[in-house]
Amino acid sequence: MLLSITNLDFAYGEAQILYNVTLDVELGKVTCLMGRNGVGKTTLLRNIMGTLKSNAGRMLFAGQDIIKKPPHERAKLGISLVPQGRDIFPKLTVEENLRIGLEARSDGITKIPPEIFELFPVLHDMRRRMGGDLSGGQQQQLAIGRALAGNPGLLLLDEPTEGIQPSIIKQIGVVLRKLSQRGDMAIVLVEQYLDFVKEFGDSFHIMNRGRFVHSGTIDALSDNVVKEHLSV
């Protein structure tokens, strides 16, 4: 198991957000976190990345306890987060954005891996354009590319399809499938777009009020489960 979380708690002051969250993430799989807005999905990703400090629980990554490690150390170990809203640097070029991702590498490589341009050809075509000049879909590809530049073993994505045109949503899904099928990466995906989850996910965990309330393989994500736990 690449990532194993046990009894994770997190609170903002007196307001507890996560309760006894337990999650196992396998290499070669796309693990989908689902749930209505405000139930703790993004908070969980930030706890995994270390940008939020867990109050209790255990978190093992590749067999190493990382619960007390800061974000930059987790990045060096091979954890990358593509945040909701992308957070690319608008005043830097595409190439400069990607080079920032290289800082997370532990192998000393300073050249952008050609694979990133193979996965997202538009980034090569626009490598000298400012990040802020790209469309929303192109910025999302850039954000994923920047994360991949760090050579992660665990890729965390927070709603990558939000506000993106359908053709690029499909392309992102195909890329995630390619990455997972290599077998040397695990992907944790926070996503509300049900068709995307069903097409590209392997397993799902539905959250409500900071707890997992239903889990299973993607083929178990039935209409009844959706109606009970996800319908607004």
Image: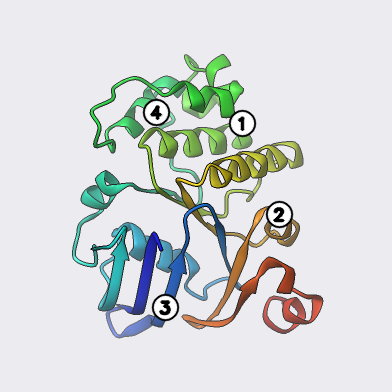
Identify the secondary structure beneath mark 1: loop
Q: Quadrant of residue 184?
A: top left
> Which numbered disc, 3 or 2, marks the residue that appears first in the sequence?
3
Q: Position of residue 209 (x, y in %)?
A: 50, 83
The answer for how far apart the CA atoms under marks 4 and 2 are is 27 Å
Kind of residue sitting beneath label 3: Thr
Query: Which of disc 3 and disc 1 is earlier in sequence?
Result: 3
Q: Is residue 110 in view?
A: yes
For residue 97, which quarter of the picture?
top left
Q: Decide: marks 3, 2 in contact (CB < 8 A)?
A: no
Read off the residue under disc 4: 97
Q: Please report contact status of discs 1 and 3: CB closer than 8 Å, yes or no.
A: no
Left or right of 222? Residue 56 is left
Q: Nearer the viewer, mark 2 or mark 1?
A: 2
User: Depth-wise, is mark 1 or mark 3 nearer the camera?
Assistant: 3
Q: CA distance from mark 2 to mark 1?
A: 21 Å
Residue underneath mark 2: 196
- How far separated are the C-alphas under marks 1 and 3? 37 Å
**Amino acid under label 1?**
Ser
Query: Circle 3 sits on which residue?
Result: 22
Which residue occupies 60% across, 22% down?
122
Q: Position of residue 111 (x, y in %)?
A: 34, 19
